Amino acid sequence: MAISIDTNGNKRERELIESLAYYCIQKMMPRKKNLEIDIIQVTNLKDTDGDWANCIDTEDLNTFEIKVERQMSLRKKLLSVAHELVHVKQFSRKELEHTESISYSTWYGKRYRTTNKYWELPWEIEAYGMELGLFNQWIDDKKIKGNFINDPT
């Protein structure tokens, strides 16, 4: 498995993102060995793509690109990476599949209109449901320290 972090961020931030990424994949897909994931921090992603983070799948079920908004706090970046890695799991296992139309996706064989309410899409419910749990398990298991651990809200 290869995970690359493309960022101008500091070394500690890159190490944390990489550690979390490997941890999430190990938790969700422990037998998966041939994944290639590029995690790229992008400025103005919200303006250009309409998202703070996204996961881009390819025709190869083992190759993915995750983009994350550079200007987010470290905590939000890490939670976003965990969220997008849930989508990697979904695509890799064919739980979630794109269709011939960008307006539809297939979730466990059932076709969903992607223009429906975002919060009601089952793959987003799963990703949001897992991101914080994966993040907190990683902090506990790896004994991660830092200001970003506690939610400031």
Image (spheres, rainbow, N blue to C red):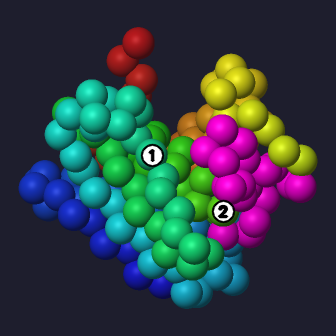
Residue numbers of the magenta segment: 92-109
Residue 107 highlighted magenta (yes or no): yes
Residue 112 place in picture, x, y as percent: 80, 38
Q: What kind of residue is marked 2?
A: Phe
**Residue 4 makes an appearance in the image:** yes
Residue 19 place in picture, x, y as percent: 39, 64
Assign the C terminus to one quadrant of the image.
Answer: top left
Who is closer to the viewer here, 24 or 39? 39
Read off the residue under disc 1. Answer: 54
Q: Residue at x 71, y 55 (%)?
A: 99
Q: Which mark is residue 27?
A: none
Residue 132 place in picture, x, y as percent: 57, 38
| Mark 2 secondary-structure assignment | helix
Up the image or down, 16 lies above or below 36; here it is above
Q: Residue at x 34, y 60 (%)?
A: 39
Residue 105 highlighted magenta (yes or no): yes
Q: CA distance from mark 2 to mark 1?
A: 13 Å
Q: What kind of residue is marked 1?
A: Asn
Give the mark, 2 or 1, whose residue is nearer the N terminus: 1
Left or right of 11 on screen, residue 49: right
Read off the residue under disc 2. Answer: 91
